[in-house]
Image (cartoon, grey):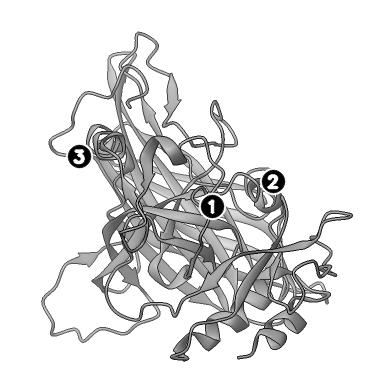
Amino acid sequence: MSACAVAAAARGRCLAAALSQARAASASTRPWGGLRTALGAAGLGVGAAPRRLLSSRNRPEGKVLETVGVFEVPKQNGKYETGQLFLHSVFGYRGIVLFPWQARLYDRDVTSPVSEKSENSTGHGSKEVKGKTHTYYQVLIDARDCPHISQRSQTEAVTFLANHDDSRALYAIPGVTHISFGISPPGLDYVSHEDILPYTSTDQVPIQHELFERFLLYDQTKVPPFVARDTLCAWQEKNHPWLELSDVHRETTENIRVTVIPFYMGMREAQNSHVYWWRYCIRLENLDNEVVQLRERHWRIFSLSGTLETVRGRGVVGREPVLSKEQPAFQYSSHVSLQASSGHMWGTFRFERPDGSHFDVRIPPFSLESNKDEKTPPSGLHW
């Protein structure tokens, strides 16, 4: 795909659409041309003129395009290293890889032979699904892009229960925000391997984030030229229980793909009983051209104690997002608590079509498991 073709795709439409076409060109064996981005904006494009205006509705008034790097061919095999610069293929932000996680992906869109013996995910009324190892990355997001993706993606909330007298207290890992418990700047996310569009830059500080220079050091002799400082290694080790990504669940209904990532947060005592907390991140993605809008959620929450709770409501986190060809995805995080050490959740999202008709999209069943060797939650932020 030529640089001009990518630029043409970017004009008059959302960046995600242009990136989708760029990603489709990843099979090419030649490096891509200069990557240009609107200063302080999430809009990115490729063009012949460094100061070419980006005629996208996402472009702030008066902003111009500036070269920030050169695309690399995405890796079909292997992992990206610490320090790899990238664009997110769906949300379009600039970021840098901190370190990888090896997760188990339970994809209900992939049929597994019943005869195979494997690790499986369980859920009420659901088929047995084989888990497959899949790479995700802990990343930093460029602070200049965060304001422009906030309506489509809540950057991950790495929250945990603190070792504190107030059993209801929730704290956040540095560099993270959350809609309910945001106490620190946004900019930490989990990104799937296939969502990475790698690029290189000659800039020694290509990502603007308060943690960038605390975690990474420029070394021109390395590829990529950004290496982990001891502070990053120490931060990863100390916060591992609250950062670790282990299971990912995915299912598609009528071209709407739902991906769920649960995280265990910890346990607290309340009124002579134990209360276990989890957070979960959900991504909704429209794989079709038809515009749809999320209207309702319907959850079923089963606890090992034997209780079954039903939750219904309008939208999610106070929003009713529209998923279109130009803006196909929406991502958010929420929390759930049980008075048992394990359980599971499943349900549906109700969407509305332009003609007023509705359809239900399945939320893949996912387990809520507490850590067997639970460690004491931190009393403060670890560095």
What residue would you read off at disc 2? 147
Which residue corresponds to the image point at 54% horizontal and 88% vertical from the top-left? 25
Of labels 1 and 2, the one closer to you: 1
Picture quadrant where residue 336 is located:
top left
Where residue 19 appears, as percent x and y from the top left, is: 62, 75
| Residues at marks 1 and 2, CA–CA distance in whole angstroms | 18 Å
Q: How many marks?
A: 3
Callout 2: SS: helix
Dividing the image into 4 quarters, which one contains the N terminus?
bottom right
Q: Residues within 10 Å of mark 3 (few under 14, many from 20)?
A: some
What residue would you read off at disc 3? 371
> Left or right: where does residue 82 sit relative to residue 64?
left
Question: In the image shown, does 162 or 114 lie closer to the viewer?
Answer: 162
Q: Amino acid at mark 1?
A: Pro
Callout 3: SS: loop
Where residue 197 appears, as percent x and y from the top left, is: 49, 71
Where residue 221 appears, as percent x and y from the top left, is: 31, 59
Q: Amino acid at mark 2?
A: Pro
What residue would you read off at disc 1? 206
Which residue corresponds to the image point at 53% horizontal and 76% vertical from the top-left? 253
Which residue corresponds to the image point at 57% horizontal and 44% vertical from the top-left? 208
Question: Farthest residue in the top direction?
Answer: 165
